[in-house]
Protein backbone atom coordinates (compact mmCIF):
# COMPACT_ATOMS: atom_id res chain seq x y z
CA UNK A 1 0.00 0.00 0.00
CA UNK A 2 2.89 2.33 0.78
CA UNK A 3 4.39 1.67 -2.65
CA UNK A 4 1.05 2.37 -4.25
CA UNK A 5 0.93 5.81 -2.58
CA UNK A 6 4.46 6.74 -3.61
CA UNK A 7 4.73 9.34 -6.37
CA UNK A 8 7.10 8.81 -9.27
CA UNK A 9 7.90 12.34 -10.36
CA UNK A 10 9.12 11.23 -13.76
CA UNK A 11 5.70 9.73 -14.57
CA UNK A 12 3.97 13.01 -13.80
CA UNK A 13 5.61 14.68 -16.79
CA UNK A 14 3.24 14.41 -19.77
CA UNK A 15 4.35 12.04 -22.48
CA UNK A 16 4.24 14.70 -25.18
CA UNK A 17 6.74 16.76 -23.16
CA UNK A 18 9.25 13.93 -22.69
CA UNK A 19 12.24 13.58 -24.97
CA UNK A 20 14.49 10.58 -25.51
CA UNK A 21 17.86 10.16 -27.14
CA UNK A 22 16.41 8.80 -30.34
CA UNK A 23 14.21 11.80 -31.10
CA UNK A 24 16.86 14.27 -29.98
CA UNK A 25 19.43 12.82 -32.39
CA UNK A 26 16.96 12.31 -35.20
CA UNK A 27 15.32 15.59 -36.31
CA UNK A 28 13.14 13.76 -38.81
CA UNK A 29 11.59 11.72 -36.03
CA UNK A 30 11.15 14.63 -33.60
CA UNK A 31 7.55 15.36 -32.63
CA UNK A 32 6.43 18.97 -33.00
CA UNK A 33 4.56 20.58 -30.09
CA UNK A 34 1.88 22.66 -31.77
CA UNK A 35 -0.45 25.15 -30.16
CA UNK A 36 -3.34 22.70 -30.13
CA UNK A 37 -1.33 20.26 -28.04
CA UNK A 38 -0.19 23.01 -25.69
CA UNK A 39 -3.71 24.32 -25.28
CA UNK A 40 -4.97 20.81 -24.57
CA UNK A 41 -2.22 20.35 -21.99
CA UNK A 42 -3.26 23.53 -20.19
CA UNK A 43 -6.83 22.25 -20.05
CA UNK A 44 -5.68 18.90 -18.63
CA UNK A 45 -3.63 20.71 -16.00
CA UNK A 46 -6.58 22.71 -14.71
CA UNK A 47 -8.78 19.57 -14.73
CA UNK A 48 -6.22 17.66 -12.67
CA UNK A 49 -6.04 20.42 -10.08
CA UNK A 50 -9.84 20.66 -9.95
CA UNK A 51 -10.30 16.89 -9.51
CA UNK A 52 -7.63 16.87 -6.82
CA UNK A 53 -9.44 19.63 -4.93
CA UNK A 54 -12.69 17.60 -5.00
CA UNK A 55 -10.86 14.54 -3.68
CA UNK A 56 -9.38 16.67 -0.91
CA UNK A 57 -12.84 17.38 0.50
CA UNK A 58 -13.64 13.67 0.73
CA UNK A 59 -11.57 13.54 3.91
CA UNK A 60 -10.00 10.13 3.25
CA UNK A 61 -6.27 9.51 3.24
CA UNK A 62 -6.41 8.36 -0.36
CA UNK A 63 -8.31 11.50 -1.28
CA UNK A 64 -5.68 13.73 0.35
CA UNK A 65 -2.85 11.80 -1.34
CA UNK A 66 -4.65 12.07 -4.69
CA UNK A 67 -5.07 15.81 -4.19
CA UNK A 68 -1.36 16.43 -3.75
CA UNK A 69 -0.55 14.06 -6.60
CA UNK A 70 -3.00 15.83 -8.93
CA UNK A 71 -1.78 19.24 -7.80
CA UNK A 72 1.83 18.34 -8.54
CA UNK A 73 0.83 16.81 -11.86
CA UNK A 74 -1.08 19.94 -12.84
CA UNK A 75 1.77 22.25 -11.83
CA UNK A 76 4.23 20.23 -13.93
CA UNK A 77 1.87 20.64 -16.90
CA UNK A 78 1.60 24.39 -16.41
CA UNK A 79 5.31 24.98 -15.85
CA UNK A 80 6.17 23.17 -19.08
CA UNK A 81 3.28 24.39 -21.22
CA UNK A 82 2.57 28.05 -20.46
CA UNK A 83 6.01 29.53 -21.31
CA UNK A 84 6.06 27.65 -24.63
CA UNK A 85 2.53 28.66 -25.44
CA UNK A 86 3.33 32.30 -24.57
CA UNK A 87 6.37 32.35 -26.90
CA UNK A 88 4.40 30.57 -29.63
CA UNK A 89 1.55 33.09 -29.37
CA UNK A 90 3.97 36.03 -29.69
CA UNK A 91 5.49 34.54 -32.86
CA UNK A 92 2.08 33.85 -34.33
CA UNK A 93 0.52 37.24 -33.55
CA UNK A 94 3.63 39.39 -33.97
CA UNK A 95 1.81 41.62 -36.47
CA UNK A 96 -1.01 42.24 -33.99
CA UNK A 97 1.50 43.07 -31.22
CA UNK A 98 3.35 45.45 -33.54
CA UNK A 99 0.08 47.16 -34.47
CA UNK A 100 -0.89 47.69 -30.80
CA UNK A 101 2.63 48.96 -30.06
CA UNK A 102 2.43 51.54 -32.88
CA UNK A 103 -0.99 52.71 -31.69
CA UNK A 104 0.31 53.07 -28.13
CA UNK A 105 3.41 54.93 -29.30
CA UNK A 106 1.30 57.30 -31.39
CA UNK A 107 -1.02 57.91 -28.44
CA UNK A 108 1.96 58.68 -26.18
CA UNK A 109 3.30 61.21 -28.71
CA UNK A 110 -0.17 62.75 -29.03
CA UNK A 111 -0.47 63.12 -25.24
CA UNK A 112 3.02 64.62 -25.00
CA UNK A 113 2.25 67.39 -27.49
CA UNK A 114 -1.43 68.07 -26.68
CA UNK A 115 -2.01 67.35 -22.97
CA UNK A 116 -2.32 70.32 -20.62
CA UNK A 117 0.82 70.63 -18.44
CA UNK A 118 0.58 69.75 -14.76
CA UNK A 119 2.82 71.58 -12.28
CA UNK A 120 3.63 70.40 -8.75
CA UNK A 121 4.71 72.43 -5.71
CA UNK A 122 5.10 71.71 -1.99
CA UNK A 123 4.25 73.77 1.08
CA UNK A 124 5.84 72.76 4.43
CA UNK A 125 3.94 73.94 7.51
CA UNK A 126 4.43 73.95 11.28
CA UNK A 127 1.20 73.00 13.04
CA UNK A 128 2.24 74.73 16.30
CA UNK A 129 1.78 71.67 18.50
CA UNK A 130 -1.64 70.67 17.13
CA UNK A 131 -2.08 67.01 16.16
CA UNK A 132 -1.13 66.72 12.49
CA UNK A 133 -3.86 64.13 11.81
CA UNK A 134 -6.44 66.89 12.14
CA UNK A 135 -4.89 68.85 9.26
CA UNK A 136 -4.62 65.67 7.17
CA UNK A 137 -8.42 65.39 7.12
CA UNK A 138 -8.82 69.03 6.06
CA UNK A 139 -6.30 68.72 3.20
CA UNK A 140 -7.81 65.44 1.96
CA UNK A 141 -11.25 67.07 1.86
CA UNK A 142 -9.88 69.93 -0.26
CA UNK A 143 -8.13 67.43 -2.55
CA UNK A 144 -11.38 65.53 -3.11
CA UNK A 145 -13.13 68.75 -4.13
CA UNK A 146 -10.37 69.53 -6.64
CA UNK A 147 -10.30 66.01 -8.12
CA UNK A 148 -14.07 65.89 -8.58
CA UNK A 149 -14.17 69.32 -10.23
CA UNK A 150 -16.21 70.90 -7.41
CA UNK A 151 -14.51 74.24 -7.99
CA UNK A 152 -17.35 76.34 -6.60
CA UNK A 153 -17.23 74.55 -3.22
CA UNK A 154 -13.44 74.62 -3.20
CA UNK A 155 -13.39 78.36 -3.91
CA UNK A 156 -15.80 79.06 -1.04
CA UNK A 157 -13.86 76.94 1.45
CA UNK A 158 -10.50 78.62 0.99
CA UNK A 159 -11.73 82.03 -0.24
CA UNK A 160 -10.58 81.82 -3.88
CA UNK A 161 -12.24 82.85 -7.10
CA UNK A 162 -13.77 80.00 -9.07
CA UNK A 163 -11.22 80.56 -11.86
CA UNK A 164 -8.35 80.23 -9.40
CA UNK A 165 -9.89 77.08 -7.93
CA UNK A 166 -10.35 75.58 -11.39
CA UNK A 167 -6.56 75.60 -11.86
CA UNK A 168 -6.08 73.30 -8.85
CA UNK A 169 -6.03 69.65 -9.88
CA UNK A 170 -5.26 68.13 -6.49
CA UNK A 171 -4.13 68.89 -2.94
CA UNK A 172 -2.44 66.07 -1.05
CA UNK A 173 -1.15 65.66 2.51
CA UNK A 174 2.31 64.28 3.34
CA UNK A 175 3.57 63.66 6.87
CA UNK A 176 7.15 64.79 7.56
CA UNK A 177 8.66 62.69 10.35
CA UNK A 178 11.22 65.16 11.69
CA UNK A 179 12.28 64.03 15.15
CA UNK A 180 15.13 64.42 17.63
CA UNK A 181 16.15 61.71 20.11
CA UNK A 182 17.04 63.11 23.52
CA UNK A 183 19.26 61.01 25.80
CA UNK A 184 17.90 60.79 29.32
CA UNK A 185 20.49 60.77 32.10
CA UNK A 186 18.23 59.16 34.72
CA UNK A 187 16.19 56.84 32.54
CA UNK A 188 17.03 53.79 30.48
CA UNK A 189 14.74 54.95 27.66
CA UNK A 190 15.27 57.80 25.22
CA UNK A 191 12.75 60.60 24.80
CA UNK A 192 11.78 61.35 21.20
CA UNK A 193 10.77 64.91 20.43
CA UNK A 194 8.73 64.97 17.21
CA UNK A 195 8.26 68.33 15.53
CA UNK A 196 4.78 68.94 14.12
CA UNK A 197 5.75 69.56 10.49
CA UNK A 198 3.68 68.42 7.53
CA UNK A 199 3.58 69.07 3.77
CA UNK A 200 0.79 70.02 1.39
CA UNK A 201 1.47 69.02 -2.23
CA UNK A 202 -0.44 70.93 -4.91
CA UNK A 203 -0.93 69.91 -8.55
CA UNK A 204 -1.96 72.83 -10.74
CA UNK A 205 -2.55 73.82 -14.34
CA UNK A 206 -1.09 77.30 -13.80
CA UNK A 207 1.82 78.26 -11.52
CA UNK A 208 0.59 81.83 -11.18
CA UNK A 209 -2.05 80.64 -8.69
CA UNK A 210 0.59 79.57 -6.12
CA UNK A 211 1.05 82.87 -4.19
CA UNK A 212 -2.64 83.41 -3.52
CA UNK A 213 -3.15 79.68 -2.88
CA UNK A 214 -0.43 79.72 -0.21
CA UNK A 215 -1.96 82.71 1.57
CA UNK A 216 -5.53 81.39 1.51
CA UNK A 217 -4.59 77.83 2.38
CA UNK A 218 -2.59 78.83 5.47
CA UNK A 219 -5.41 81.11 6.61
CA UNK A 220 -7.95 78.30 6.14
CA UNK A 221 -5.94 75.70 8.07
CA UNK A 222 -4.87 77.99 10.91
CA UNK A 223 -8.26 79.69 11.29
CA UNK A 224 -10.24 76.57 12.10
CA UNK A 225 -12.26 77.04 15.36
CA UNK A 226 -11.14 73.67 16.66
CA UNK A 227 -7.51 74.85 16.64
CA UNK A 228 -8.24 77.79 18.93
CA UNK A 229 -10.16 75.61 21.38
CA UNK A 230 -7.43 73.00 21.32
CA UNK A 231 -4.76 75.62 21.97
CA UNK A 232 -6.64 76.91 25.02
CA UNK A 233 -6.90 73.44 26.52
CA UNK A 234 -3.26 72.55 25.83
CA UNK A 235 -2.09 75.90 27.18
CA UNK A 236 -4.00 75.41 30.43
CA UNK A 237 -2.59 71.89 30.84
CA UNK A 238 0.99 73.00 30.15
CA UNK A 239 0.75 75.94 32.57
CA UNK A 240 -0.57 73.63 35.31
CA UNK A 241 2.24 71.16 34.58
CA UNK A 242 4.86 73.90 34.85
CA UNK A 243 3.42 75.02 38.21
CA UNK A 244 3.66 71.46 39.50
CA UNK A 245 7.26 71.10 38.30
CA UNK A 246 8.26 74.36 40.03
CA UNK A 247 6.72 73.18 43.33
CA UNK A 248 8.57 69.86 43.10
CA UNK A 249 11.88 71.57 42.33
CA UNK A 250 11.40 73.99 45.27
CA UNK A 251 10.79 71.08 47.66
CA UNK A 252 13.84 69.24 46.37
CA UNK A 253 15.97 72.38 46.74
CA UNK A 254 15.20 72.45 50.48
CA UNK A 255 16.16 68.82 50.77
CA UNK A 256 19.39 69.39 48.85
CA UNK A 257 20.28 72.32 51.15
CA UNK A 258 19.86 70.14 54.25
CA UNK A 259 22.08 67.45 52.76
CA UNK A 260 24.79 69.90 51.75
CA UNK A 261 24.70 71.55 55.20
CA UNK A 262 25.04 68.16 56.90
CA UNK A 263 27.96 67.16 54.71
CA UNK A 264 29.74 70.50 55.27
CA UNK A 265 29.03 70.36 59.08
CA UNK A 266 27.07 73.58 59.00
CA UNK A 267 23.73 74.61 60.44
CA UNK A 268 23.41 71.57 62.67
CA UNK A 269 20.42 73.18 64.40
CA UNK A 270 18.50 73.43 61.11
CA UNK A 271 14.84 72.44 61.02
CA UNK A 272 15.88 69.34 59.07
CA UNK A 273 17.35 66.73 61.41
CA UNK A 274 19.99 64.86 59.41
CA UNK A 275 22.32 62.07 60.43
CA UNK A 276 24.13 59.25 58.70
CA UNK A 277 22.31 55.94 58.36
CA UNK A 278 23.68 52.44 58.30
CA UNK A 279 22.43 51.87 54.76
CA UNK A 280 24.88 50.60 52.15
CA UNK A 281 26.38 53.43 50.13
CA UNK A 282 26.31 55.93 52.99
CA UNK A 283 22.68 56.95 53.24
CA UNK A 284 21.14 59.77 55.30
CA UNK A 285 18.12 59.90 57.58
CA UNK A 286 15.92 62.98 57.24
CA UNK A 287 13.36 64.16 59.77
CA UNK A 288 13.58 63.16 63.41
CA UNK A 289 9.81 62.69 63.77
CA UNK A 290 9.45 60.45 60.70
CA UNK A 291 12.81 58.81 59.98
CA UNK A 292 13.35 58.15 56.25
CA UNK A 293 16.51 56.76 54.70
CA UNK A 294 17.65 58.38 51.46
CA UNK A 295 20.70 58.30 49.26
CA UNK A 296 22.39 61.74 49.17
CA UNK A 297 22.40 62.03 45.35
CA UNK A 298 18.73 61.15 44.79
CA UNK A 299 17.40 64.74 45.28
CA UNK A 300 20.02 66.07 42.86
CA UNK A 301 19.34 63.55 40.06
CA UNK A 302 15.58 63.86 40.57
CA UNK A 303 15.83 67.64 40.29
CA UNK A 304 17.72 67.34 37.00
CA UNK A 305 15.07 65.02 35.58
CA UNK A 306 12.24 67.37 36.58
CA UNK A 307 14.10 70.38 35.16
CA UNK A 308 14.44 68.57 31.81
CA UNK A 309 10.70 67.93 31.79
CA UNK A 310 10.10 71.57 32.70
CA UNK A 311 12.19 72.73 29.72
CA UNK A 312 10.23 70.49 27.34
CA UNK A 313 6.93 71.80 28.70
CA UNK A 314 8.15 75.39 28.30
CA UNK A 315 9.17 74.69 24.70
CA UNK A 316 5.75 73.19 23.95
CA UNK A 317 4.06 76.23 25.49
CA UNK A 318 6.16 78.66 23.44
CA UNK A 319 5.51 76.73 20.23
CA UNK A 320 1.81 76.60 21.04
CA UNK A 321 1.59 80.35 21.51
CA UNK A 322 3.35 81.01 18.19
CA UNK A 323 1.18 81.40 15.12
CA UNK A 324 0.77 78.76 12.40
CA UNK A 325 4.06 79.05 10.48
CA UNK A 326 5.23 78.34 6.94
CA UNK A 327 8.56 76.49 6.94
CA UNK A 328 8.96 76.32 3.15
CA UNK A 329 6.58 78.07 0.78
CA UNK A 330 5.39 76.94 -2.64
CA UNK A 331 8.10 77.19 -5.31
CA UNK A 332 6.98 77.78 -8.89
CA UNK A 333 8.76 75.12 -10.97
CA UNK A 334 8.59 75.92 -14.69
CA UNK A 335 9.10 72.31 -15.82
CA UNK A 336 5.82 70.35 -15.56
CA UNK A 337 5.63 66.85 -14.08
CA UNK A 338 3.27 65.83 -16.91
CA UNK A 339 3.68 65.22 -19.77
CA UNK A 340 7.32 64.21 -20.21
CA UNK A 341 9.35 62.05 -22.59
CA UNK A 342 9.17 59.12 -20.20
CA UNK A 343 5.39 59.05 -20.61
CA UNK A 344 5.84 58.20 -24.30
CA UNK A 345 8.04 55.25 -23.30
CA UNK A 346 5.51 54.27 -20.63
CA UNK A 347 2.61 54.14 -23.11
CA UNK A 348 4.75 52.17 -25.58
CA UNK A 349 5.65 49.54 -22.99
CA UNK A 350 2.01 49.26 -21.97
CA UNK A 351 1.16 48.57 -25.63
CA UNK A 352 3.76 45.78 -25.87
CA UNK A 353 2.54 44.12 -22.67
CA UNK A 354 -1.11 44.45 -23.66
CA UNK A 355 -0.44 43.05 -27.13
CA UNK A 356 1.43 40.01 -25.80
CA UNK A 357 -1.34 39.25 -23.28
CA UNK A 358 -4.04 39.51 -25.96
CA UNK A 359 -2.00 37.22 -28.22
CA UNK A 360 -1.63 34.65 -25.45
CA UNK A 361 -5.37 34.45 -24.83
CA UNK A 362 -6.08 34.31 -28.56
CA UNK A 363 -3.72 31.31 -28.82
CA UNK A 364 -5.63 29.61 -26.00
CA UNK A 365 -9.03 30.26 -27.55
CA UNK A 366 -8.08 29.69 -31.21
CA UNK A 367 -5.20 27.18 -31.28
CA UNK A 368 -3.50 26.70 -34.60
CA UNK A 369 -2.94 23.11 -35.67
CA UNK A 370 0.28 22.38 -37.49
CA UNK A 371 1.41 19.30 -39.36
CA UNK A 372 3.50 16.83 -37.45
CA UNK A 373 6.64 15.49 -39.03
CA UNK A 374 7.26 11.76 -38.75
Image (cartoon, grey):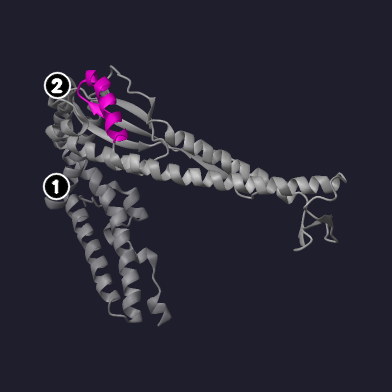
Start-end of magenta stretch? 202-223
The residue lying at 84 percent from left, 56 percent from top is 275
Question: Is 206 a magenta residue?
Answer: yes
The residue at 13%/30% (across/down) is 103
Q: Main secondary structure of the magenta part?
A: helix
- Mark 2 secondary-structure assignment: helix
**Residue sitting at 35 percent across and 66 percent down?**
11
Q: Is residue 114 left or right of residue 68?
A: left
Please state the horizontal and vertical placement of residue 97, each as a whole percent of the image.
Answer: 17, 36
Q: Is residue 57 left or right of residue 355?
A: right
Instruction: Name the residue nearer the viewer: 207 or 80.
Output: 207
What residue do we see at 80% from left, 55% from top?
A: 273
Label 1 or label 2, whichever comes before in sequence order? 2
Q: Which residue is mark 1?
A: 362
Q: Is residue 230 left or right of residue 278?
A: left
Please, is residue 50 above or below residue 248 in the view?
Answer: below
Amino acid sequence: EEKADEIDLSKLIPKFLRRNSETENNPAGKRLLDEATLSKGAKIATENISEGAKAMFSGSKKGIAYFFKSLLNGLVYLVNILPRLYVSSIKRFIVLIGFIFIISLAYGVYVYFTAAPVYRASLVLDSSGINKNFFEGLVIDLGNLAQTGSYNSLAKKIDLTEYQASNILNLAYENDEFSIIIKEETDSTDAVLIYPFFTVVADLKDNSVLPVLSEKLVAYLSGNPFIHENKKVKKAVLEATLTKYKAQISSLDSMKKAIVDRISKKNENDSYWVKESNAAGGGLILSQEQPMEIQPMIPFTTTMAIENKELKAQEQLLRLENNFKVINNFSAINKPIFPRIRHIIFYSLKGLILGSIISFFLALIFPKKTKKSI
